[in-house]
Image: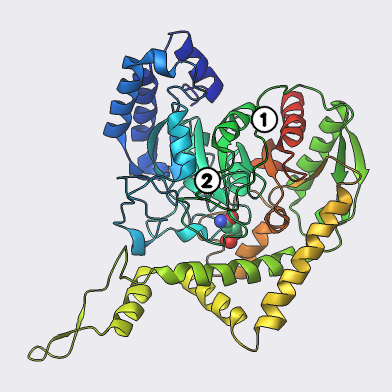
């Protein structure tokens, strides 16, 4: 399953002249051809372009040899704009949308020597926790294809977990990188808000969205973060913080590190096997030299309602641009009977385009978000949510006076069966209980595999770090990974 190897292995083999970019790309494409018909990780496979690009890299080795991702095949979540390659956000409304530009993160990957092999399946506009909200059908969990891979970056997680690519990018608004990484048994990193440019990411909730890597090892996500991080004039919310080499200085111990354990929070509604794996992970961290410290995050219990108010409010405004006029799908129907045909008036065209173009979950969110922003309800819902968001951030600030990272399970349950929760949106939203607060507080967080359930489903450990201290967080995650 893992013949391709890790990012680090592929890059090093390319440098030593043992594997060409074309060889690696061919292997990735044949794995995709073999596994993707069942797993549906990809919306679009760019095989020909990828091979041409790999050949170009091979024919100019001197130029690429020192680049951090030389010859590494990468899959991109289908909400990241790629010049000349269809970018759908798994929505009918963008089914045929071909962007004229690359997202900054994509351009940075390419100048680091990466070979893009395709665009991955996800929940429509990244709204979901299971990938079942894709207009093109769900991706499937490689460990149990009757189960969800998690969402919304499900296809990216599946591509990596099944060995199709060693690296993928996803986006994380409330857990969409970490949760599928956990459910598919790989590493997923959401950087600090402002660490990675959002230019070219189809916006869901702009104050929460971040792009980040999914890979099989902590070292690989660290390598990828180093490539995509940093200020970007095209995104005014990016920070001028210096970007260290996140993969340098990873070690196998966590001596001197203090890990916060919010026991009261973790005790609520968590699957027994997840709790057991979490406890065992804490023991490993202790063995690696870390000190465990009890902490309290009193407002974290409110994170789900706060998130679903703010995220839907921002989504309703961001998605107003899909009107059938500027890009994407347009309902070109006509009105009237056969003798008096006339084109739709503008308002009807908008309404029909949006009615046919968006799926049910996206519509639900637009309606919820429009409601909480409307006159008379704004103060009671949106403003209140913003206030509690500040309290959640302060909870973490207080905790970080005592600890370097906070440890929690990534997801309260392992992967559930496809179809099991589709009729119960609230139940679906509860899957985000441990992930949304990092987005609300703008903090970096990483999910690392921490074992399996009795029936072989992966479980993830989440570490949340201080603002712009991904380096420390990744060091602790790496020490854990080496020790388990
Ligand atoms: N599951 C959450 C939601 O449905 C998070 C999605 C995300 O991070 N993009 O909104």
Quarter of the figure that contains the C terminus: top right
Q: Which mark's residue is nearer the viewer, 2 or 1?
A: 1
- Report whether 156 appears left or right of 260: left
Nearest the viewer among 433 and 258 is: 258
Are the residues flagged by discs 2 and 1 in contact, CB closer than 8 Å?
Answer: no
Q: Where does the image place residue 215, in percent across and percent down from the top left?
A: 56, 33
Is disc 1's CB within 8 Å of ligand 1? no
Within the image, what quadrant is residue 425 found in? bottom right
Mark 1: few/some/many CA within 10 Å (<14, 14-19, 20+): few
**Quarter holding ligand 1:** bottom right
Q: With respect to residue 21, does 420 lie above or below? A: below
Q: Nearer the viewer, residue 181 or 83?
A: 83
The circle on residue 170 is: 2
Left or right placement of residue 11 versus residue 338 in this view: right
Mark 2, other Cα within 10 Å: few <14 / some 14–19 / many ≥20: many
Question: Residue shown at 67%/30% (left/top)?
Answer: 244
Q: Which mark is residue 244?
A: 1
The image quarter containing residue 220 is top right
Disc marking residue 471: none
Q: Specify which label sits upstream in the sequence, 2 or 1.
A: 2
Can residue 281 be seen by looking at this rendering? yes
**Residue at x-position 45% and y-position 60%:** 124
Q: Is residue 262 above or below residue 351?
A: above
Question: In this rendering, does residue 133 appear at all?
Answer: no
Q: Classify residue 195 as left or right of residue 6.
A: right
Question: CA separation, marks 2 and 1?
Answer: 21 Å
Residue drawn at the location 68% of the way across and 52% of the way down: 413
* Picture layout, residue 357 above or below residue 293: below
Horizontal and vertical percent position of residue 206: 57, 60
Residue 368, compared with residue 239, is above or below; it is: below
């Amino acid at each position: 399953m893992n013949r391709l190897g890790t990012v680090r292995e592929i890059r090093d083999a390319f440098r030593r002249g043992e594997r060409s970019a074309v060889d690696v790309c061919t292997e990735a494409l044949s794995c995709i051809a073999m596994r993707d018909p069942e797993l549906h990780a990809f919306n679009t496979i760019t095989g020909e372009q990828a091979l041409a690009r790999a050949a170009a890299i091979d024919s100019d080795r001197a130029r690429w040899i020192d680049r951090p991702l030389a010859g590494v095949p990468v899959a991109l979540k289908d909400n990241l704009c790629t010049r000349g390659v269809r970018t759908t956000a798994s929505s009918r409304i963008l089914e045929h949308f071909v962007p004229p530009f690359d997202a900054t993160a994509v351009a940075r990957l390419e100048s680091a020597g990466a070979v893009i092999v395709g665009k991955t399946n996800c929940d429509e506009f990244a709204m979901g926790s299971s990938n079942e909200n894709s207009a093109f059908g769900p991706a499937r969990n490689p460990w149990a294809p009757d189960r969800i891979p998690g969402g919304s970056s499900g296809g990216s997680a599946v591509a990596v977990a099944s060995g199709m690519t060693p690296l993928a990018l996803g986006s994380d608004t409330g857990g969409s990188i970490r949760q599928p990484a956990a459910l598919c048994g790989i590493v997923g990193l959401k950087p600090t808000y402002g660490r990675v440019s959002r230019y070219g990411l189809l916006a869901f909730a702009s104050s929460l969205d971040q792009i980040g890597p999914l890979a099989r090892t902590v070292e690989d996500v660290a390598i990828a973060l180093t490539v995509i991080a940093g200020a970007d004039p095209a995104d005014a919310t990016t920070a001028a913080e210096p970007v260290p080499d996140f993969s340098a200085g990873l070690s196998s111990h966590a001596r001197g590190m203090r890990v916060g354990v919010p026991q009261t929070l973790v005790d609520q509604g968590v699957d027994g096997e997840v709790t057991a794996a979490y406890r065992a992970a804490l023991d490993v961290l202790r063995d690696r030299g870390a000190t465990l410290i009890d902490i309290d995050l009193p407002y974290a219990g409110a994170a789900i309602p706060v998130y679903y108010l703010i995220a839907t409010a921002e989504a309703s405004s961001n998605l107003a641009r899909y009107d059938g006029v500027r890009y994407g799908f347009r309902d070109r129907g006509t009105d009237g009977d056969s003798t008096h045909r006339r084109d739709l008036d503008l308002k009807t065209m908008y309404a029909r385009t949006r009615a046919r173009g968006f799926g049910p979950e996206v519509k639900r969110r637009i309606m919820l978000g429009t409601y909480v922003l409307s006159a008379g309800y704004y103060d009671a819902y949106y403003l209140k949510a913003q206030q509690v968001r500040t309290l959640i951030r302060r909870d973490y600030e207080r905790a970080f006076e005592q600890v370097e990272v906070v440890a929690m399970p990534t997801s309260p349950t392992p992967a559930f069966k496809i179809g099991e929760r589709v009729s119960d949106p609230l139940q679906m939203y509860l899957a985000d209980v441990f992930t949304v607060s990092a987005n609300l507080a703008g903090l970096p967080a990483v999910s690392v595999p921490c074992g399996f359930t009795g029936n072989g489903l992966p479980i993830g450990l989440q570490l949340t770090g201080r603002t712009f201290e991904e380096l420390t967080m990744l060091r602790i995650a790496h020490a854990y990974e080496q020790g388990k």
